[in-house]
Amino acid sequence: MDLADQIKSDIESNPIILYMKGTAETPRCGFSKRAVQVLEHYGVSFKDVDILADPEIRVRLSEYSNWPTIPQLFVNGELVGGSDIIQELHQRGELLPVLERAVLPEGE
């Protein structure tokens, strides 16, 4: 499986996935740290992928998402956005319903 296929597979198989600089335990930029803090605020489980581990991840991810900046949050296979959008949705109270759709069984 090539890297582009791996990214697609990871996005499709993880209800919440955050591509970031560093890891959830050790974010390596302020934008990634803020994204992690918001997700942790809601107590949701998510997969984190460190784009610094392989520079090609960022290239293939941006090709896949058509989004140039990092971090990138995907929920149920759809791009939510980067740090600013995550923060804005959180402040407006609109992020929790998006996250709940990923963690609650269908119909609840």
Image (cartoon, rainbow, N blue to C red):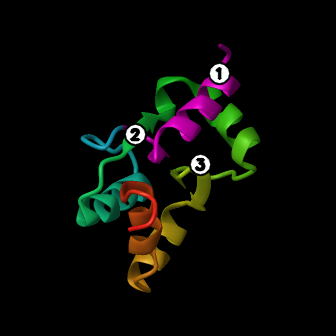
Pointer 3 local density, CA inside 10 Å: few below 14, some 14–19, many at least 20:
some
> Picture coordinates of residue 21 (x, y %)?
44, 41
Instruction: Indicate which label's residue lies in the foreground, 3 or 2.
Output: 3
Q: Which mark is residue 22?
A: none
N-terminal of the pair, mark 2 or mark 1, is 1
| Residue found at the very far bottom of the displayed protein | 92
**Residue 33: image location, x then y, percent:** 34, 55
- Residue that badge 2 annotates: 48
Which residue is nearer to you in this view: 54 or 41? Answer: 41
Does the magenta segment cover residue 6?
A: yes
Which one is earlier in the sequence, the residue at label 3 or at label 2? Answer: 2
Q: In the figure, 89 relative to 99: above or below?
A: below
Which stretch did the figure color magenta?
1-22
Residue at 43 percent across and 73 percent down: it is: 97
Q: Which is in the foreground here, disc 1 or disc 3?
A: 3
Q: Which residue is mark 3?
A: 77
Residue farthest to the top, as pictured: 1
Q: Please report the residue visible at 60 percent of the width from the left and 24 percent of the height from the top.
A: 6
Residue position for label 1: 3
